[in-house]
Image: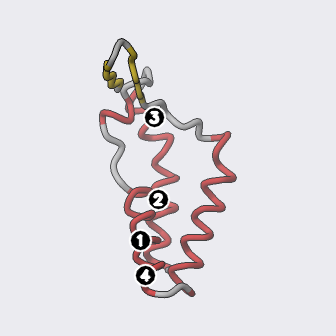
Amino acid sequence: MEVSWRTDGRTFSIWTQPVPLEQTQALRDHALRIVEWVLNNGPWLATLGALSVLQEATRSVAPIDTSHVEDADAFRAEWKPERLKALAIYETG
């Protein structure tokens, strides 16, 4: 998806790109450990924030997420284990 705005002869554009799975694995795993810790040990307000993170991490892969990939089904399959990791935190957290 790409969105552009023009104002005073200048253009501002934003677009989405898929996140590379392997290159971001360590960061995502660390983030999930933090979320799990907050759910188990944090105050209620932080817990609500952690639940919001899990909600995003477990959401379905939408068409906008696959607009820049060749094979949307393969992309969904590749990310399914990551979504299941986040879902497991609901059960253990």
Sequence-first tag of 4 and 1: 4
Q: Which residue is mark 4?
A: 45
Determine whether 53 is above or below 45 in the image: above
- Tell me which residue sits at (67%, 40%) in the image: 23
Residue position marked by numbered label 2 in the rendering: 84
Q: Residue at x 63, y 59 (%)?
A: 29
Real-space Cα separation, disc 4 to disc 2, in angstroms = 24 Å
According to the picture, the residue beneath numbered tag 3 turns out to be: 75
SS at mark 1 in the image: helix
Residue located beneath label 1 in the image: 51
- SS category of the residue bearing label 3: helix
**Disc 2 to disc 3, how far (Cα)?**
15 Å
Q: How is the image coloured?
A: secondary structure
Choose the circle earlier in sequence order: 4 or 3: 4
Q: Nearer the viewer, mark 4 or mark 3?
A: 4
- Give the distance between the C-alpha atoms of the residues marked 1 and 3, in whole angstroms: 25 Å
Label 3 near label 4: C-beta < 8 Å? no
Whole-number angstrom distance, CA of label 4 to CA of label 1: 10 Å
